[in-house]
Amino acid sequence: GPNSSESYLDMDNVCAAIEATGAKSVHPGYGFLSENSVFAERVEAMGVAFVGPPSGAIDSMGDKIKSKQIAIDAGVNCIPGFQGVIQDEDDACKVAREVGYPVMIKASAGGGGKGMRIAWNDEEAKEGYRLSTEEAIMSFGDDRLFIEKFIEEPHHIEIQLLADHDGKVVCFPERECSVQRRNQKVLEESPSALLTPEVRSEMCRQAAMLATAVNYRSAGTVEFLADKHGNFYFLEMNTRLQVEHPVTEYVSGVDLVEHMLKIAGKQPLPADLTTESIAKNIKGWALEARVYAEDPFRGFLPSTGSLLDYREPEGCTAFNLESNVRVDSGVREGTEISTYYDPMISKLVTHGATRDECIDRMSDALNRYVILGTAGFAHNASFLADLCRHPRFRRAETPTSFIEEEYPDGFQGVQLDEQETLHAVATAAMIQATRAEREVMQVGASSDGYNSAPEASLFDAGAGGGDEWVVVQGLPGNDEAGEPNGTAYHTRIVDEDGGLVVEVRAMAADAGAVAARVRVGDYSWQLEQPLLEVEMDGVARVVQYHTPSGTGGGTRACGFNLGLCGAVLPMNVLTPKEHELYQHMLAPEVVDTANFVHSPMPGVLVSLSVEPGQHIENGQEICVMEAMKMQNVLRSPRAGIVAECHAVAGQKLDVDQLIVSLVSEEADLNEELAA
């Protein structure tokens, strides 16, 4: 079936497959069955090795209330909170006030950021209780919640460990997973720039104490919250292999999955593999970015569609520590991203001798990662690129509130600096000139694209436009107020001293303004291919080029998207005459959508909070939608009156499907009803 409960989470089907194949062992991966004690027991009852911890440890650590008590008894630092189950919304408010706001409301059976909400007051505690309960039931089949103190400005630090049947526990250098959104990890790195060797040692000691207390074996992760003063508190233990385990493998040189399999076969850990030996020989730095099918420009809402062009960075490998770029993915061209599963496309992992080198390598890998889908499909690679160039991330000043603090109004796109903008404009002119060159050459003569060389001079004879182009970043023409839709630049490509120079001048600048000069070095592009490499002003650039659907491949006003440093720039390149004529075209009609609440994604309408005739305020909850295992609250775009509800709870919705329509006044409502 389409739902996870009918496919990879169906224990009966998995056990039937084990029996049919004669499998001797089962590795549960990262999914929820990996932390399901019932599944582990069923596998063991079949006489098959479960590649993971014993069911008792899964049960003890999977229950967040029970695991916290075990940690307290073992002498592990714990967050203050209420050691009991929250009964209802009123109880949530009562307990939250006793613990002291802000608090974290958490699902007892939770994991992966599901069923978690921060509350700063009673109103948020009530909403958090309701949404966390719904998510917990949907994800874990367990609605129990508890509350603990929310540690302000925390860093999320976790310790990977391996434990064998002889009781030996080996802890690895920490991973920092503080760059999060809605409690979902976005970037993970190892080691952490926050920890001193002394704090690292103590954190490893306490993680080993907890593993010993529950007779743990196999791979596991103990998660902590740490503050800037070196204090840390137990958060939870994940009794499985973590999604972010590759960064640990890079900095330790240890294949974690290999040891999981050996431990499942009752082999002991090597004598020379110790916590101390690994800590003394940390191998550089590693960073993982989670590439999701979600739209960062629309509040990170899940996105669906099929992959039309999917190309991982050249030279990357999977499951190989010899390469500095690794991609773990489960997709390929043609794969459909649906609403029924987690929206992760892949894990992109890089390694370097230093943290800066590692981040630079990640930025380059993101530039070379081509992910194109059907109309409306979106992914977060642009956001990941922006994170990697953010000054606070480069300085390692990233508590778990980092994204919320730095992107309070959501992601607005990568903001290029002056040089990057000039290089983007110059590249657009070079692309259009290359395409124009193709038209004036004999058929097939330029099938391999244009490569700059001293003897190349066809730019001076471009079709219709010569070597001059107007590059418009955005749409050409004017809006309803007569203002330009985009930013226009006049460009001229000249052959100078055996090389190419692109002169760029903003057309809004004074007539006497001196054009900027961009010197072009190596330039390589196979026509209409998505990746282009160019050197400009001595800086090597990797640029993505994509022709939007419907624009064709001609050279007249044929917009294309240019990707540079994570920025996605719509470009229209025109001859000067074409640009002049565009100034006389009618502005496109602007559709007012303020009176409507549409489904921003495919999903299921979980609940509807309004009814026709109800007065609502700006930002008031309209409904809750579920997509890709997450609850999403949709709020009113303005104050008004509900005219009509076009959907009901439980209904499956398509993207942009109308849910609720609004009117401004009672008179408008009567007119709407009369119509």
Image (cartoon, rainbow, N blue to C red):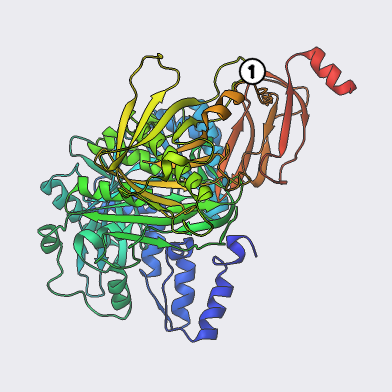
Nearest the eye: 109 or 632: 632
Instruction: Residue lying at the far right in this picture: please name it.
Output: 674
Q: Is residue 372 above or below residue 668?
A: below
In the rendering, at what x and y percent does residue 402 appear? Answer: 34, 34
Q: Does residue 650 appear in the picture of this structure?
A: yes
**Tally of marks:** 1
Nearest the eye: 171 or 436: 436
Nearest the eye: 254 or 459: 459
In the rendering, at what x and y percent does residue 62 appear? Answer: 41, 57
Determine whether, in the image, residue 590 is placed left or right of residue 428: right
Q: Is residue 577 above or below residue 363?
A: above
Q: Does residue 401 appear in the picture of this structure?
A: no
Determine whether, in the image, residue 596 is placed left or right of residue 177: right
Looking at the rendered structure, the secondary structure element under dot 1 is loop
In the rendering, at what x and y percent does residue 628 appear? Answer: 56, 50
Q: Quadrant of residue 467?
A: top left
Q: Three-letter amino acid code at disc 1?
A: Glu
Q: Is residue 313 above or below residue 300?
A: below
Quadrant for the C terminus, please: top right
Residue at position x 49%, y 75% in the image: 42
User: In the rendered image, which residue does mark 1 sit on?
Assistant: 480
Quadrant for the N terminus, please: bottom right
In the rendering, at what x and y percent does residue 481 appear? Answer: 61, 14
Determine whether, in the image, residue 646 is placed left or right of residue 318: right
Packing grade of label 1 (10 A; few <14, some 14-19, many >=20) is few
